[in-house]
Amino acid sequence: MASVRTTPAAPGLPPAIVHVVPLAAMAVVMLDSATDFFPDDPLIGVVTPVRLALLTGLVALVVGGARLSAFRSRLDIPVALLLLAAAGTTYVGGHPTAPLRALVTSVGAYYLMVGLRRTQPESWRAVALFALFSVVAAGTTAFSQLTNETPTGFCRTGLLTDVDCDEGVAGALIRATGTFANPNLLAAFLVLLTPLTLLAAVAVAERTAQSAVVLVGLIGYGALLTTFSRAGYVAAAAGLLVLGTAYWLAPRLGRRGRRVMAALGVVVVAAGAVGIWMVSRAGDSLGVRGQAWQAAVDTALANPLGVGLGRSGAVISAAAPGGRQFVHAHNLWLNWLVEVGAVGLLAIVLVTVVAYVSAARAAREKSVIGTVGLAALTGFFLMSMADHPANLVRMDTLFWLVLGLVMAEAPSRRRQDTPAPAGRPRHGSHQRAHGTAPLPQPARPAGEPATEPATEPAAGPVAVRSAAPWG
């Protein structure tokens, strides 16, 4: 198993500060992704409040003794390739650098999550609580909009048909947007983050508290219903199906069965990609999305190096017939192809495949983080086939945070020899006790006898994997 070595914190720096500052930075980044409570205007130069918190958290990890190995992951090469492609397209094309800075910020959030999880293995409990608070904030706002009939500018009627809210059509229902600008973004947020609330059920041992966490999860999925997003419904159902399959069915399958399931998943994704390509060449067979895809493919063929970050909407709008305005290509991977070219597409495909395979392997080993991460990524990737919610910076940051949570669970190297101590949640039908790893004991003054055995050494290797059971 992989191990991460840390060095003692800087002399004179209180250990509590080193411990809390990265957690506080993570809270700021995650909660801002959910609620946008920090202003986007920079404090000085290009440093916004969120970027300041992110930078402070990363510095605190380094000052606290985190070595380079604490930040390593299997996505390092694809991430570097993605950043290089984005930077090359930006500077060669003379495009604005703001979208590139936003991408660097999201990648920084990824490495904050990886470094925090590696140096503080029990931090998954805090991440679970942050996810819980975020879902509550967005979900309750959505319910409030629906129950109080607060106009959002989005309405549907009949079989989820879009209508103009001002027309007063009989049976029209307001589509909740929660803390986002439109209901599809709220749906993507809930699809991605609601499965992670189940981690909070593992973080608490008392069954009443666990029931409360499950109820909050139901609030998240209930709020998803208020968006009336067809893609959101399908993505949430797929995520729940994967969650149930990974928890109950996959551990009972042999290696051959798991390989068959993985092969089916690859076939489905490949079929989806081929289908999008065929639709893009078939005119308006899928309405506005077909127009967007056709214009996106034509644009990508004419601009092999990409048109620049954040410019796909304007370019596709100019190329698509009918004068309709698009914000993006309505497909995550196709949008990267349009904006950054073939190199960017290769990089984001590698990110997708490596992250999904890593989550599936962790779920196979009965990791709760791997299981909920697999469900979250399944729903989000499925929704991203016909939409591009990560076009919003807040959603993109949240997406990279979830990637960091999943990839920190996987060793950076395939072959590892270090044994895995307790510290990470596991599930299994044979493990029913509320067994969670005890927290590190505070240091005792010299000469004071130990009243109970230490659970972890104060310094030395901190293993990436563990075997704390599902509660």
Image: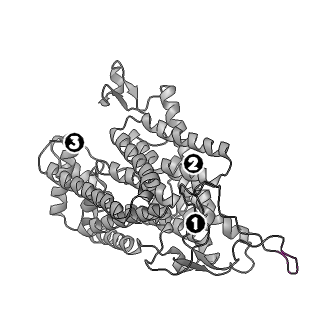
Residue with the mark numbered 3: 288
Q: Residue furthest left?
A: 282
Stretch in magenta: 444-450
Q: Earlier in the sequence, mark 1 or mark 3?
A: 3
Task: Report whether 257 appears left or right of 181.
Answer: left
Name the mark on residue 467.
Answer: 1
Q: Nearer the viewer, residue 397 or 428?
A: 428
Q: Are marks 2 and 3 in contact (CB under 8 Å)?
A: no
Q: Nearer the viewer, residue 47 or 244?
A: 244
Name the mark on residue 132.
Answer: 2
Q: Residue at x 33, y 20 (%)?
A: 169
Q: Quadrant of residue 116?
A: bottom right
Residue 21 magenta-highlighted: no
Q: Earlier in the sequence, mark 2 or mark 3?
A: 2
Q: Quadrant of residue 228?
A: top left
Q: Nearer the viewer, residue 16 or 422?
A: 422
| Magenta-colored segment: predominant secondary structure | loop
The correct choice, above or below, for 195 with respect to 406 in the image is: above
Q: Residue at x 70, y 65 (%)?
A: 439
Q: Position of residue 299 (x, y in %)?
A: 18, 58
